[in-house]
Amino acid sequence: MGSVLLPVSLLLAATCLVSGSPPTPSGPFWVHINPEVKAVRPGGSVWLNCSHSCPLPESSSLRTQLQQGGMLRGPGWISYQLLDVRAWSSNVRCVVTCAGETREATATITAYKRPDSVIMEAPVLVGHKYTLRCYVTHVFPVGFLVVTFKRGSRVIYFESLERFTGPNLANVTLTYVVRAGPNDLWQPLTCHARLNLDGLVVHSSSAPVMLTVQALSPVAKALASTSIAALVGILLAVGVAYVRKCLEMQSQ
Ligand SMILES: *[C@@H]1O[C@H](CO)[C@@H](O)[C@H](O)[C@H]1NC(C)=O
Ligand SMILES: *[C@@H]1O[C@H](CO)[C@@H](O)[C@H](O)[C@H]1NC(C)=O
């Protein structure tokens, strides 16, 4: 055994003499972080691998506001775990110092969640008005959400929820009261939820619903009596035409 080990230790000693001590990088060293951009679910975790070309770094660290978890090391790399990511967007810097020189690589971790559902309640006409109500469930970050109500293809209302800065998934309910117009009964109503995340746009829409008429509302009565009047008018006209035709036939 000793005879086998001896040449190896001689070889190591020789390598040390050749490369010099302490080891210094030849030219500028590099630092990489992988992945550089990563999206996670809010509350999720992620591993980032920071690698470098420095033979013997004086220091290396990960600088971030996010909570750090586990760590794995290998030659030329350290992998860091980040926990409970709740900020919409976080910068992470891997900083390595080698032979007095400091370099860094940065990554961006984002957290968002497409809504589980966007549901538009079927509105009921009450008097001259109806209320649109839309439920957006399990969405994040709410502060980047814009909710839009449409009648047919026309936007009738939109709201940006910038003021909500909570760190958790949320359910959002939006209501808007609309004055009924003459064509409102025949157009589909939809609700649209859009997350606009610095260029990444996540869009979800509700199924279309139709406005229904409450049995005894004055507008409903008015609408109903208008259509009855129109029907009566048509029947009368047909009746008159029929009578006229009969008379013509009899006179022939
Ligand atoms: C980290 O990156 C290095 C260099 O690319 C690679 O050799 C190593 O396997 C990676 N480690 C993990 C835990 O992914
Ligand atoms: C949001 O709504 C879903 C489904 O309606 C419900 O299960 C959940 O508990 C709600 N979450 C919050 C935070 O209110």
Image (spheres, helix red, strand yellow):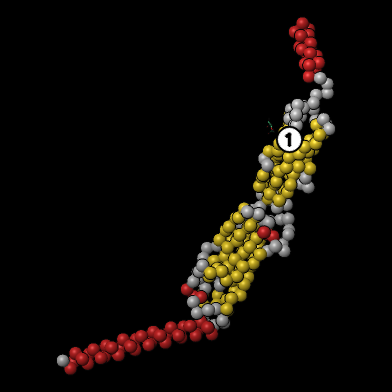
Q: Residue at x 51, y 65 (%)?
A: 208
> On the rendered structure, is 94 left or right of 218?
right
Dot 1: what SS?
Answer: strand
Q: Out of 126 and 144, give the one closest to the viewer.
A: 144
Whether residue 79 is visible here, answered yes or no, is no
Residue 91 in percent (x, y) is at 74, 47
Point 46% across, 86% down: residue: 225
Residue 13's spot in the image, x, y percent? 80, 14
Tell me where residue 217 sits by quadrant.
bottom right
> Taking 129 as reference, is 40 above or below it?
above
Q: Residue at x 82, y 30 (%)?
A: 99
Q: Amino acid at mark 1?
A: Val
Q: Image quarter for residue 80?
A: top right
Give the position of the N terminus as an image quadrant: top right
Quadrant in the rendering for residue 94: top right
| Residue of label 1 | 31
Figure quadrant, ligand 1: top right
**Residue 110 in view here:** yes
Q: Look at 66% across and 45% down and name the residue there.
A: 38
Question: How many numbered marks have been drawn onto this rendered protein structure?
Answer: 1
